[in-house]
Amino acid sequence: MAKEIYETAAVLRERADDSLHSELVALEEKLWKARFDLRRGQLADTALVGKLRRQIARVESVVSERALAAVAKAAAKKAKKAAAAAAGGGSGTEGAAPKAKRAKAPKAAKPAAAQQA
């Protein structure tokens, strides 16, 4: 049973997002059951809890890597677009002034009775 739990990060990176999410759900369910069996004294392989936790961490790491890659790709696209606009690419906002910051309202003065106390 232990062999079917393990997949290296390289193998996980080849899988689709949906597959990873379903794998994560299945592993979390197995972990819950293993902890429950451990408490009842019915778990033969007590190291299974740690193995499952490590596999869950592997899957979450791959999912996180993909999310960070997507954010980096979007930021690069935005930077490229901004560079093109600054170079005269023609987005129509070259001469626009930056937005002015909103001024804070001055604090109201305390009443005379409160100042004396």
Image (tube, rainbow, N blue to C red):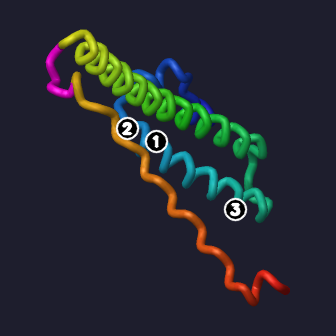
Q: Nearer the viewer, mark 3 or mark 1?
A: 1
Kind of residue at badge 2: Ser
Tags 2 and 1 touching, CB below 8 Å: yes
Residue plotted at (54% across, 37% down): 60
Of residues 33 and 71, the one drawn nearer to the viewer in this rendering: 71
Residue 102 place in picture, x, y as percent: 43, 52
What is the span of residues highlighted in magenta in the rendered image? 89-93
* Vertical side of 18 occupied by 110: above or below: below
Q: Main secondary structure of the magenta part?
A: loop
Q: Amino acid at mark 3?
A: Phe
76 within the magenta span? no
Q: Nearer the viewer, residue 4 or 112?
A: 112
Which residue appears at 35% of the width and 31% of the height? Answer: 16
The residue lying at 73 percent from left, 41 percent from top is 50
Q: CA distance from mark 3 to mark 2?
A: 26 Å
Identity of the residue furthest to the top in this view: 87
Find the distance from the CA under tag 3 to the CA under tag 1: 20 Å
Q: Which residue is mark 3?
A: 36
What is the quadrant of the N terminus in the image?
Answer: top right
Q: Looking at the picture, how far across and down is residue 116, in whole percent?
A: 82, 85
The kind of secondary structure element at disc 3 is: helix
Residue 32 screen position, x and y as percent: 63, 57
Mark 2 neighbour class, 10 Å CA radius: few under 14, some 14 to 19, many 20 or more: few
Tag 2 secondary structure: helix
Q: Which residue bears the numbered disc 2? A: 19
**Residue projecting furthest to the bottom:** 113
Q: Nearer the viewer, residue 96 or 65?
A: 96
Q: Residues at badges 3 and 2 in contact (C-beta under 8 Å)?
A: no
From where the camera sits, is residue 1 visible? no
Q: Position of residue 112 (x, y in %)?
A: 72, 85
Q: Which residue is mark 1?
A: 23
Q: Please say if 56 is above or below 36.
A: above
